[in-house]
Image: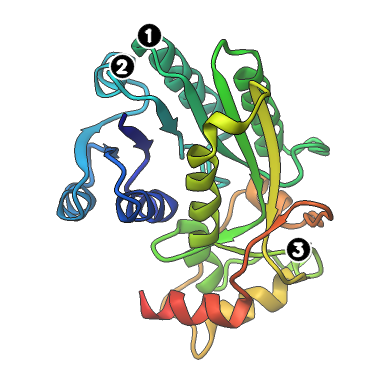
């Protein structure tokens, strides 16, 4: 049965769609209605594409007909917290209406202790929504994720890293490693006995945010003023978001930066 990927125009969305297609899966890509370029790129690799908005439950439900799994990729740190929750609720409602069996969603490391950060609190709310829904769910709490065409990656590369967050420790995760785990989670869907599963995924190297931002800007910073990150994102970046005992992605920082530059 097909897999539907929401926000397929994003960095992680494209990576998930490519990996699913390389495995021979039938992929439906739900793309933001404003992004014609991404829609054509996804059609070119064999995806069936629907363009729309995540708050359009009827359109989503139509796209989800005969779909077993929806990989919902809405809710990255640059998304307003209320939108993170509203979009997830709409996707879950549409999935139930269409008879889907599973939702897979990337949350964020730190959701176990949000420390009054509104984005992490939104992640907690979505995790609870998925755990309470009458369908299978897999939540991947991922570390700070970077990749091509990712808005937060681009902002950090432009010099937007908050000065007060420079000493915070992260385990940056390359987007393809997140895609690999999300796809693998769907592949092993029949072997997991629990209806709601949460796993943690980090990159293989811990480093300070300031050092990571410096690596992203090498060899030279793009021209123009750096964007200003909102207080919620700045606070998130300023937290030490590392953990032990989870899954570790295989792509180290030098390789990730090379692949980022190549794309």
Q: Nearer the viewer, residue 66 or 77?
A: 66
Residue 166: percent from the left, percent from the top? 75, 69
CB of mark 1 within 8 Å of CB of mark 2?
A: yes
Can you see residue 227? no
Q: Nearer the viewer, residue 203 or 121?
A: 203
CB of mark 2 within 8 Å of CB of mark 3?
A: no
Numbered circles on residues, count: 3
In the structure shown, which secondary structural element does the residue marked by tag 3 occupy? helix
Establish if 116 lies above or below 142: above
User: Would you name the residue on which mark 2 appears?
Assistant: 61
Disc 1 crowd, CA 10 A, few/some/many (<14, 14-19, 20+): some
Determine the residue positioned at 74% across, 38% down.
111
CB of mark 1 within 8 Å of CB of mark 3?
A: no
Residue at the extreme bottom of the image, as rendered: 219
Disc 1 and disc 2: Cα gap in Å?
7 Å
Disc 1 and disc 3: Cα gap in Å?
43 Å
Q: Residue 165 shows which numbered tag?
A: 3
Q: Earlier in the sequence, mark 1 or mark 2?
A: 2
- Depth check, mark 2 against mark 3: the one in front is 2
Q: In this image, 33 relative to 92: left or right?
A: left
Disc 2 and disc 3: Cα gap in Å?
41 Å
Residue 66: percent from the left, percent from the top? 29, 20
User: Would you name the residue on which mark 1 appears?
Assistant: 97
Disc 3 crowd, CA 10 A, few/some/many (<14, 14-19, 20+): some
Determine the residue positioned at 37% across, 38% down.
5
Q: Earlier in the sequence, mark 2 or mark 3?
A: 2
Can you see residue 243? yes
Q: Residue 249 shows which numbered tag?
A: none
In the structure shown, which secondary structural element does the residue marked by tag 2 occupy? helix
């Amino acid at each position: 049965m097909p897999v539907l990927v929401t926000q397929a125009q994003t960095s992680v969305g494209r990576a998930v769609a490519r990996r699913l297609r390389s495995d021979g899966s039938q992929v439906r890509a739900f793309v933001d209605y404003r992004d014609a370029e991404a829609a054509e790129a996804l059609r070119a690799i064999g995806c069936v594409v629907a363009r729309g908005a995540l708050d359009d439950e009827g359109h989503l439900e139509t796209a989800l007909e005969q779909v077993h799994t929806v990989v919902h990729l809405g809710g990255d740190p640059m998304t307003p917290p209320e939108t993170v929750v509203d979009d997830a609720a709409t996707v879950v409602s549409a999935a139930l209406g269409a008879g889907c069996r599973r939702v897979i969603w990337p949350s964020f490391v730190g959701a176990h202790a949000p420390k009054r950060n509104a984005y992490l609190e939104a992640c907690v709310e979505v995790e609870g929504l998925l755990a309470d829904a009458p369908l299978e769910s897999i939540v991947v709490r991922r570390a700070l994720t970077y990749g091509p065409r990712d808005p937060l990656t681009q902002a950090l590369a432009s010099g937007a890293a908050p000065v007060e967050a420079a000493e915070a420790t992260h385990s940056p995760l390359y987007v393809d490693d997140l895609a690999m785990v999300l796809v693998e989670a769907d592949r092993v869907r029949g072997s997991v006995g629990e209806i709601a599963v949460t796993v943690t995924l980090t990159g293989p190297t811990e480093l300070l945010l300031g050092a990571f931002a410096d690596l992203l800007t090498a060899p030279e910073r793009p021209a123009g003023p750096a964007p200003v990150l909102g207080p919620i994102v700045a606070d998130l970046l300023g937290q030490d978001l590392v953990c032990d005992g989870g899954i570790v992605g295989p792509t180290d920082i030098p390789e990730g930066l090379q692949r980022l530059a190549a794309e």
